[in-house]
Image (tube, helix red, strand yellow):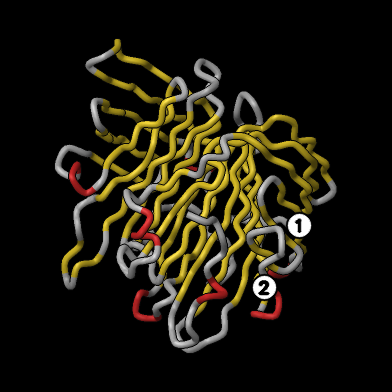
Amino acid sequence: MEERARFAEVAAKAGHYESFYLKACRPGGGRGIWIRHTVHKRPGAEATGSIWFTLFDREAGAPRAAKVTVPASGLSVPADGWVRVAEAEIGPGRAAGSLAVEASAGVADPAPTVTRAAWSLRFDGDRRPCHYLPADWLYEAPLPRTKFVAPFPDAAFDGTLEVDGETVEIAGWPGMIGHNWGTEHAERWTWLEGTGFADSPDTWFDAGAARVKLGRRISPWVPSGFLSLDGVRHRLGGLGRIRSSRIEETPTGCTFLLPGKDIVVRGHVEAPQDAFVGWIYADPNPKGGDHHTVNCSVADLELTVESPARPARHLTLPGAAAYELGMRETDHGIPVQPFPDG
């Protein structure tokens, strides 16, 4: 399946959202970045593009974030890249960009806001894309309404980052590149991710789970993901394993059980409340409304891998995992960035 941006192919009357994003953490954890390049299009309207930037630092306290949104004229598909939004571009092996936000556009308390950021990054790693849907034809079908893939599920980043006058040298930061798109967000979702395990360098873990609206009802959690262990990829979850999976989520943590073929992954991810950034995600369908989405890309992750063929494996990733929860609740206690969506 060709990895490409989809927004240019969307009919004028259709709704659409799309995101190319990167996540990277300092070796040993505690500090990380999360950068999203998104397209949002309501039915019958022109698309808009946004750059979302977050610098996480467990020692410094609350994440510092910013977002810039531009009209359709600020969107393009580079000849040798995936997408360009305003002054930021991402493509195979590279991501570079900058943004500037007026100080009055954000508030210092309770949601710290970056006023200027610039980055020039190179990345390489596992170039075999991770297709979370079980068949390629599903990526072109109307359902499911959300598609997701990781073009680089395990990557190492090098380059420089400047945030409000501070220069951060990035050398060998483990992370990943993700891509998702669709016509509506799930009613509720989680994202669980880990790269850079010190006790198992070739291991990476990337999984999500969603609850979707079925008329007036909401489905149970539908999980999907992969664990790569000792160079072998194990598909987790799927429609056939809904009953044997478990997701127990809160705004700051998640306990999960994700079965695969001849493998079971049990785990827990969490971080302090002040390590999360909060955002508004708007559905491209106006009837879908808004979600509050909280993300920590410097969370603590513990995994236990069980298989009949081998002893149980215990893996830990302190301060370098990602946990995201998309929800309808607004009383989660995590400050939401003062930037609209859609």
In the image, residue 173 sits, relative to residue 181, either above or below, namely: above
Q: Residue at x 64, y 44 (%)?
A: 33
Whole-number angstrom distance, CA of label 1 to CA of label 2? 14 Å
The crowding category of the residue bearing disc 1, from other C-alpha atoms within 10 Å (few below 14, some 14 to 19, many at least 20), is some
Q: Residue at x 44, y 78 (%)?
A: 15
> Is residue 335 shown left or right of residue 186?
right
In the image, residue 41 lies at what x, y percent? 51, 78
Q: Amino acid at mark 1?
A: Gly
Q: Earlier in the sequence, mark 1 or mark 2?
A: 2
Circle 2 sits on which residue? 75
- Quadrant of the rendered image containing residue 124: top right
The crowding category of the residue bearing disc 2, from other C-alpha atoms within 10 Å (few below 14, some 14 to 19, many at least 20), is many
In the image, residue 153 sits, relative to residue 325, either above or below, namely: above
Q: Amino acid at mark 2?
A: Leu
In the image, residue 5 lies at what x, y percent? 56, 64
Q: Are marks 1 and 2 in contact (CB under 8 Å)?
A: no
Q: Residue at x 42, y 67 (%)?
A: 182
Circle 1 sits on which residue? 97
